[in-house]
Image (tube, helix red, strand yellow):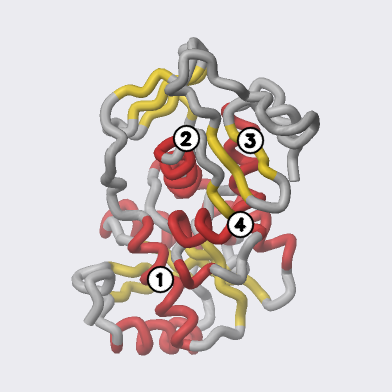
Amino acid sequence: MSNEAMNSRILVVDDEERMVRFIRLNLEHDGFVVAAAYRGSQAIQAIRENLPDLVLLDVMLPDIDGFEVLQLIREVNSVPVIMLTAKGEEDDRVKGLELGADDYVTKPFSPRELVSRVRAVLRRTEAISGSLRGLIHVDDHLKIDFDRREVWLDGSLVKLRPTEFRLLYHLVQNAGWVLAHDTILAKVWGYEYQDEPHYVRLYINYLRQKLEKDPADPVYILTERGVGYRFVDFRRNKPDASASTPGANQLV
């Protein structure tokens, strides 16, 4: 039994009883504790009362659709959420990520894929530990407190989703160094996500929208075309945000 499975409580939200039984059977076989909800309203109540470690949330529910349930969850809770979407519904997958889902799995899926995704999300939602401690002053505008998991921009608290915060952590930890797309995927999402390069671009854009004055011409999260991304080296006296060629930091 893996460390991720031991005592981890998974809430499955799906109105199809056969699907719930299928998911429950496979997750319990790997040592997870599984609870079920068949409606969006039941899911909200179950999250409040039982505090699951992860939620598997179907998009199509009879009372409240999965996207609305996700929005309600994110108003009060940062519990990891994996969306269950129909095969080929790219818009649903992107919408779920934009609303704060940690991942998605498309139906039909194999038991191995499901368990692998659940384990990966649980691993990366564990507390970040590393060399970055206390309050970091990037410049007069941006401050980051990794101990308290807070980001301040021009004196205002910036609300980051868990995945955004993990991405920022690894970028800042390696400030001044270029992180390749594959490296970012492995550090932030896990090695299981090597075939999901769009995750990096999507979440880099999310961070830029929240941290950059002009996301199309960023000064903190810089693009190295064809290679990856780097966070400006704020530890130097005069961070050089223009080290790349003109236009190299545009959105990709």
* Picture quadrant of residue 137: top left
Picture disc at residue 118: 1
Q: Residue 119's spot in the image, x, y percent?
A: 37, 71
Query: In the image, which disc is placed on residue 199?
Result: 4
Look at the numbered discs 4 and 1 and tell me whether their residues touch, using CB distance below 8 Å. no
Q: Residue furthest right?
A: 247
Q: Please state which of the two labelled residues, at mark 2 or mark 1, is closer to the viewer.
A: 2
Residue linked to disc 3: 222
- Image side of residue 117 versus residue 133, left or right: right
Residue at 29% in and 31% down: 148
Hey, which residue is sitting farthest left in the picture? 7
At horizontal 59% and vertical 34% (from top left) the residue drawn is 221
- Image location (x, y in percent) of residue 187: 44, 56
Q: Residues within 10 Å of mark 4 (few under 14, many from 20)?
A: many
Distance CA(mark 4)–CA(mark 2) = 20 Å
Element type where label 4 sits in the image: helix
Where does the N terminus fall, quadrant-wise? Answer: bottom left
In the rendered view, tell whether residue 201 sits above or below residue 134: below
Instruction: Give the mark toward the camera: 4 or 2.
Output: 2
Q: Is residue 41 visible?
A: no
Which amino acid lies under the numbered mark 3 shown in the image of this protein? Leu
Q: Tell me the crowding category of disc 3: few under 14, some 14 to 19, or many 20 or more residues within 10 angstroms, Cα based.
A: many
Give the SS element for disc 3. strand
Name the residue located 46 percent from the left edge and 69 percent from the top edge. 191
Of the image marks 4 and 2, the number of the one nearer the N terminus: 2
Q: Amino acid at mark 2?
A: Ala
